[in-house]
Image (tube, rainbow, N blue to C red):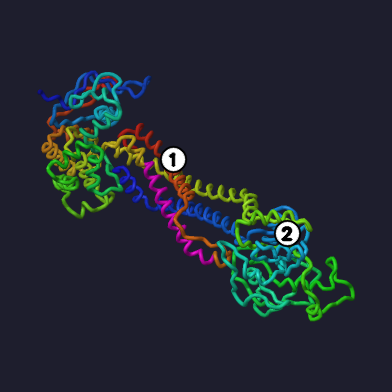
Amino acid sequence: MPQTAAIQLSNLRFRWRQGLPEVLNISELEVARGERVFIRGASGSGKSTLLALLAGVNLPTNGEVNILGQAISQLNGSRRDHFRSDHIGFIFQLFNLIPYLSVLENVALPCRFSRSRRLNATRSGNTLHDEARRLLEHLGMADDDLIHRPVTELSVGQQQRVATARALIGAPEIIIADEPTSALDSDMRQLFIRLLFQECERTGSTLLFASHDKQLESLFERHITLEKINRIGQELG
Amino acid sequence: MAILSLAFKSLLNRRFTASLILLSIALSVSLLLGVERLRVESRNSFANTISGTDLVVGARSGAINLLLYSVFRIGDATNNISWSSYRSIADHPKVAWTIPLSLGDSHMGFRVLGTNRDYFLHYRYSSKRRLSFHAGGPFEQVYQTVLGYEAAKALNYRIGQRIVIAHGTGKTSFTLHEDKPFEVVGILNPTGTPVDRTVHVPLEGIEAIHQGWIAGRQLAGLQISAEQALERDLTPKALTAFLVGLKSKLATFQVQREINDYRKEPLLAILPGVALQQLWDLMSVAENALLVVTALVVTIGLVGMLTVMLAGLNERRREMAILRSVGARPRHILLLVTGESLLLSLVGIAIGLLLLYGGLLVAQPYVESHFGLYLPITLPAPREWFMLGLVGTSGLLIGLIPGYRAYRYSLADGMNIRI
């Protein structure tokens, strides 16, 4: 059986509401499994909107979004939520963690909501917290002292690594990172991305990395500039 | 389950506000139950103002009127009953004992009750509890008196002191029986009944102080000293009422009918339990008003919770968005926020119960000794469980309001983190 693409868009159009102007108009986009894609776009270019469509949070006005061979618009709201929590891990810009949970609980959080990710995470016979600890170790957060600290006392870089471990736990097929490095200094960014690559490689996850930071672009094998594929942006430009 | 443990941790993280909400719910719950307990117990104690007495007999009037003046010493008798009628009923073969009651005088606002020593022997209140003495003992001579606990306490009287009885029942009376003072020989323990506010004297004492009086006035120039009075025949000519104990309860209705049909004098015999119930029903409005007020207090506690939860919601939109991004569905968000309210209500109820029982333990001896009201420490009654259930359910329903708002937010925000 030929493997389906991780992400495949065709004739995608999106407007927030009837009567408002279109925000996105993308004729074609395909991302293969295991690919690491850098999505570049200035703020306001519709990056976050595109990511929300890929995640199935919003549905396209026209066209189709296929994730892992599944047409997202054919799922109802609750099935979409299930699908997302099973297959997609998220990393956001800043303050990604739940303040009242411990580091390990934060990392294990997706497994509370997704059975398949819980099964993936515990497949090797590990407990969830063992698996969380293992991921943190890979991301350079092995220190017991760090792990037992309240998450609000971690540095921004440490917080982002915890958020990354959370996105990776249970090996979701797709990792969506929305400006995850914008709060880090440039040394930390390089390190962070290297660690992220390593882990995506290990789990075979597809990585979509949205940023406006050109310096990071060269680290990725594939670049997409949103302004180029989005016809709306071209018209405006 | 997973969501409820999240709710718990989230509350723990906001322990200061959470404990304030808990405090207000716990206090209002303990107030609600406390008032309910007091209500039930004072009702019981009211119904037990007099017990063991099968019939109360007085001149013919209304049942509640007779009860009011004979047992509660409120108001006045419409008429007296003659000594001979009393004797003939007291000698009825089915009657075990009687307690004669003669009212009409007072001491510093407290009613004076003329009776005999059978009063201390047969009078029962609450669940067949008999009168006991705080100090001293029953009267033995004509010019002796036994005070109820409250009367003695309010007037600061001790054994051996002499008191003067006033004619009539007003608080300030201009006609005093100054020439015939009574010696305090006994003070009763508190009972929580009108006995506490009564000054008891022998029937003969009542008779003695009224020697030389006709129609409520002292006859001019007819001074009869205390010693002279003792030499006269002090058998009373009339009584206000009397209590009857029967040898067998089965005869109650028969004897009641016989007394009501008594030929020589129009008499009325009532069953005190029935009349007490009727009287209490008159007061149920006040009782319900009290309950309504405490229900409002609980409502205020819950509305306080609603306010805090709603106010905190906006700051928590980020938290909701993060939860959504890790796979929480909108209904999980609803459950999280509503679960927090439910947890707060349930823990509040539990603490409220602890407060109630703690309060009961502390207050029980005090309330009993000062108000004669015994508060039993028992498990919540079905009605109290029902109230608690109602509070819990209201907490849940109220929690649905912020829950629903969070649900709407999480639908609208999706995973967009708003600061």
Q: Chain of mark 2?
A: B
What main secondary structure does the magenta stretch of the protein show?
helix
The image quarter in which residue B43 lies: bottom right
Q: Chain of mark 1?
A: B
What is the x, y in percent for residue B21? Answer: 43, 50
B237 or A72: which is nearer to us? B237
A177 or B297: which is nearer to us? B297
Region rendered in magenta? B337-366
Q: Which residue is mark 1?
A: B397
Q: Residues within 10 Å of mark 2 (few under 14, many from 20)?
A: many
Residue positioned 56% across, 67% down in the render: B369
B418 or A85: which is nearer to us? A85
What is the x, y in percent for residue B279? Answer: 65, 52
Was residue B344 drawn as part of the magenta stretch in this picture?
yes
Was residue A209 drawn as part of the magenta stretch in this picture?
no
Looking at the picture, which amino acid does disc 2 mark?
Gly
Q: Residues within 10 Å of mark 1 (few under 14, many from 20)?
A: some
